Amino acid sequence: MSYDPYAAGSDLPPEYEPVEQPGAYSQARKRVQAPAIALIVVGILNVLWVGWTFFNVGMMTLTPANEFHQRMLDLYQSFPQMQAEVSKRPPDELKAQSLFIGWAWVALGLLSTMLTLAGGIRMLSLKNYALGIAGAICASLPCLTCGGCCLFGEIIGIWTLIVLMNPEVRAAFQG
């Protein structure tokens, strides 16, 4: 028998009442919420850092090799040993090596940033425990992300790992 809301004398269906999650699950959700949001903030800051790095490496790509070589010599003016090493190298070789390192750094930063963001987002819904762990580790890598160099990323990453290692939180991810 189906329910007909237009039939004479029909009662309205009962209003939807949200089912409360079990106590351990809601407690785990509360524990995970703050570090997950902080992990997302670190990820957003890292997106800005990767964008800045991308811009700089892109500008380096457009710079002619001789001009790039001269800029490197000027950069190391206070360091005679480094300046001597730079002056020995051919401009094309120096630029090619710098571009390789720069683009590799951008790729690693982008990967780390995406893992951090995805880990924080999935933690909010208590899904994909391994991605949460990976995001926390990536947030705490020093010098790969902007948050890592300022201790902000390390603090958030360690805090997130401590919360994720809690047995009740781990069980909530599996449940």
Image: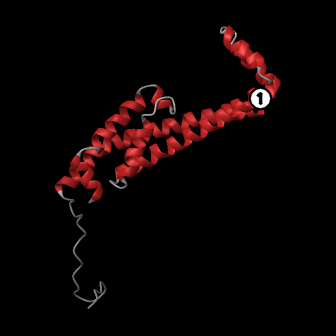
Residue 56's quadrant in the figure?
Answer: top right
Name the residue: 24% across, 44% down. 166
User: Which image quarter holds the N terminus?
Assistant: bottom left
In this rendering, is residue 152 above or below 7? Answer: above
Give the percent coordinates (x, y) of residue 40: 42, 42
Q: Is residue 152 above or below residue 128?
A: above
Colouring convention used in this rendered image of the protein: secondary structure
Q: Is residue 61 left or right of residue 126?
A: right
Three-letter amino acid code of the residue under disc 1: Glu
Identify whether 147 is placed above or below 1: above
The residue drawn where x is 28% and y is 39% is 162
User: Taking 60 as reference, is 137 above or below it?
Assistant: below
Left or right of 75? Residue 154 is left
Residue found at the very far left of the displayed protein: 23
- Residue 152 x, y percent position in the rendering: 41, 29
Q: Is residue 46 left or right of residue 58?
A: left
User: Which residue of the protein is positioned furthest toward the bottom in this rendering?
Assistant: 1
Q: Is residue 74 visible?
A: no
Q: Which residue is mark 1?
A: 93
Query: Mark 1: few, some, or many residues within 10 Å (few <14, many ≥20)?
Result: few
Q: Position of residue 2 (x, y in %)?
A: 28, 89
Is 86 displayed left or right of 36 in the figure? right
Quarter the C terminus occupies: bottom left
Q: Nearer the viewer, residue 112 or 41?
A: 112
Q: Position of residue 42 (x, y in %)?
A: 44, 37
- Residue at horizontal 74%, vertical 34%? 61
Q: Is residue 109 visible?
A: yes
* Tag count: 1
Residue drawn where x is 43% and y is 37% of the image:
139
**Element type where label 1 sits in the image:** helix
